Image (cartoon, rainbow, N blue to C red):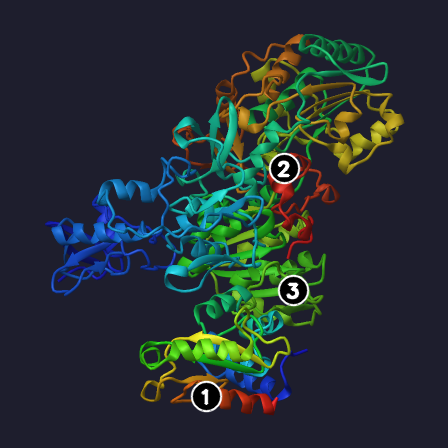
Amino acid sequence: MSVFSPTLDAKLTRLAEAYPQRRSALVPMLLYAQDELGWLTPEAIREIAERLGETELAVRETISYYSMLRTHPVGRYHVQVCTNISCLLRGGEELLQHCRKRLGLEQRDVTPDGVFSIEEVECIGACSWAPALQVNYDFHQNLDPARADQVLAEYRQKA
Amino acid sequence: MPENNSVHLTIDGRAITVPAGTLLIEACRAVNIEVPCFCYYPNLSVQAACRMCLVEIEKMPKLQTACTVPVAEGMVVRTDTPTVHKARKTTNEFLLTNHPLDCPVCDKGGECELQDMTLTYGTGTGRFDEPKRHRDEQQWSPVVFYDRPRCILCYRCVRVCGEGMDVWALGVGNRAILSTILPNAGDHLECEECGMCIDICPVGALTSGAYRYKTRPWEMKHVGAICTFCGDGCRTTLGVRNDRIIRGDNRDASGINGEFLCIKGRYGFDFTQHAERLKTPLARIDGELKPVSWAQALETVARRWRAIQQQGGRFGVIGSTRALNEESYQLQRLARQVLGTNNIDHHRSADLPTLYDALAGTSATGSAPPLAAAASLKTASAVLLVGGDPTYEHPLLAWNVRWGYRLSGTRLYVLHHREIKLRRQAHRMAVVAEGAEGAAVRYLAGQGGAVAARLSAVGPAEEKRYPQLPPPDPQPISGGLEEFKAELEKESNVVIIFGSELRGDDIRALVALGGRLAGQTRYIGLADHSNSHGAADMGLYPDLLPGYESVSDAAARGRFEALWGARLPAEAGLNQREMAEALDRGELAALYVVGANPLRLDPVNPANLRRSFLVVQDLFLTETAKEADIVLPALAAYEKTGTLTNTCGEVQATRRAAAWPGGKSDLEIIHALARLMGVDFGRPDPDRVFAEIRAHVKGYNVSVVQLAAGRSALAVPLNGAVPHRSAPHLIRSNHDTLFSDGTLGRYSHAINEVMEKRLLLPGQAR
């Protein structure tokens, strides 16, 4: 029994055959699995290892190498605030602290209702519009505390 | 023009020629130029992780890693220039960034590659002011500990576990400065617990639970002994302090096993110090076993034996599958000459007499011996495995088969009733119903009809999880063997390994099959224990003298009669089960058991045992010893000097490593009993006895120089038919796993405390 949806199940089956070496499909499979589940659960890791004929250890090795692959749950909206050079110079650090305070995430990373989580990240490639943050796959740029509040409020409403 | 297969190059001004494809680091070693390295390890994949082996190569802009560059024609290499020295110094400094300088307490101190390299090639100072990152040590299993800060990330453990052992239990997690070795089960290991990762670790990152913090390497003497557990005959280098064994390893790659050892060879020695080990002789007094002196015990035995002889009572003798060749030889002499009986047997686990009989009738007895040494599996072009499960029952043979598969392109054919782990190295694997191996061999030999079989998925692409989950029961389909047969018939110079599934006529069919294959077919019969093969060779059979000669053959018997100046009985005696039955009926007046536990295999009603005089010499109070009238405490193999014959028929010398104050060797006891019975066997000197064996036992005229040099010599007791009463029901392999070994295995803490022990029961290994 697959832990994935039928659509993803089919996609992963295609991916496993798509490369000359089966294990080449590992990183894409992990990313798609994480998108669907929010994080890489032990069950997902086991299934992906089986699909590729690899050990679970080999999958965990790869996951631990990439900081964007997670083995712990995050909120439905995962807020990633950039504090790399450009953003830092334009108030990224203050933006991070502001968001943490606004979301009540000074001491933890995920809100109790599981809606928001926050993470400080390295460059997200939005230097021209710094400071920037990313919520799941959406970018929000040229932020100041007021605009950030607006962005977070919109997500809160959606939730 | 250079020759096709050799390459000429210059290293440090010396012109040398090496085979094409040689790695530069090996070329340097060939001319005794040391290139320091950590991650490079011969016969594992190259890694180039440590950067210690940088050398200058002309026309290459940067320093190159000698461990990855194959030699090329005309290459000019320099390993001794200021640039190279500087590179080594800085690399060394980097390796020490977070490496704690705790050498005075580290187990590895004194034999650490990093310590040696730092002294030889390092700067002696470091420029890092930052505090070193510390991480607490982790215990991954009862025998494996990991000290993360000491790790220099050479990946040797990862590669030997995966490539060498095919277990894949270790990996590397995280990135850069946070990189760390990871065990496969999160916070612990689930593996074969072989300890290869510990031995191969160049630093003190992986340490052994059995040895850590017990001593310093230079405080031990190191003795090369032959492992006393399974039949493979690995050499385990025992570290001994104050006559106690503290460590077992084979870091010096001595013996037929090279660097390989399994958990039993590496940690199993602790049975020698088990609390239940017998320290004094015991005698049954008023129904209970009570300590007595050696003199009293031996005299009681001799007195009772003489009385039984005078009354015409029957004797029985059961020999050991772990005792040395010299001891087994003298035991059968005692039985035949002193006790006057052919009622002598041992726990049989391979039908060797039938193999030799079958081979004698073929042309296989030509120039080269039709037996294969363990090392020949490393280079064999093809191997056929029928039955047995070398991964768990004969770990060295499995290691060698994997070696051949990995480095020599060996094509492995497996015929089995289970999906054993070696299917992952198999070229073809046929699964037949349990017990159908013999019929399948007959089919392959062209002697019988088709057998239902299924070709199994093979190859390393299969899941590599450990422990192996039991696969679904094989659903045999008929005709599956046809392709197997067609492929096998293309092979030549095949080495055939067979387990105890084949016995009697099945072995004759196997030899017929071998005869049909091209080139010279060689055989390995799998026998359970360290000297099971030797026990058979030394004549621990009711109908066979040493060297597989019949007791009823007047000429053969005459030779031994002349040698010992005595008459020997000519009629075949009782086998082990018949002796048990005779005991049950009260028809065996005396039974002498040497290092065996026959009541475990053939239970006898204890009340009936009381009617016989039972003498047992062993290390522990086994099921059999508990019923004895006299128990004599014997020495373990690690406390004796002599020879052993492994499952392949290779004779090797073992050396006394430790002492056990209360015990005597089987040889000493046998000689003492013979003297008390009025026959002088001479001094209990293993060298003298082995000289007699060399002179008089067929196949054992091996080179003593070879044995003294620590090598093995194949004993081929092959010469004419073996008139042996085959008893297939007596071929009873224990099917021990890595975590059990007959009765002896119960007394090692190390091999019993690993959690995998619970996952793998004898005969259930996958």
Mark 1 falls on what kind of element? Answer: helix
Image coordinates of residue B690 in percent, x first then y, are 50, 23
Image coordinates of residue B6 in percent, x first then y, are 21, 57
In-image side of B121 versus B401 (left or right): left
Specify the quadrant that holds the N terminus of chain B. Answer: bottom left
Mark 3 crowdedness (10 Å alpha carbons): few <14, some 14-19, many ≥20: many
Determine the image quadrant of residue B217.
top left
Answer yes or no: are tags 1 and 3 on the same subunit. Answer: no
Image coordinates of residue B276 in percent, x first then y, are 69, 27
Specify the quadrant that holds the C terminus of chain B. Answer: bottom right
Mark 2 falls on what kind of element? Answer: helix
**The disc numbered 2 marks a residue on which chain?**
B
**The disc numbered 3 marks a residue on which chain?**
B
Q: In terms of depth relative to the viewer, which is nearer, B621 or B4?
A: B621
Mark 3 sits on what residue? Answer: B431
Marks 2/3: CA distance? Answer: 36 Å
Given the current orientation, which residue lies at the most extreme front position? Answer: A146
Mark 2 sits on what residue? Answer: B749
Q: Are marks 2 and 1 in contact (CB under 8 Å)?
A: no
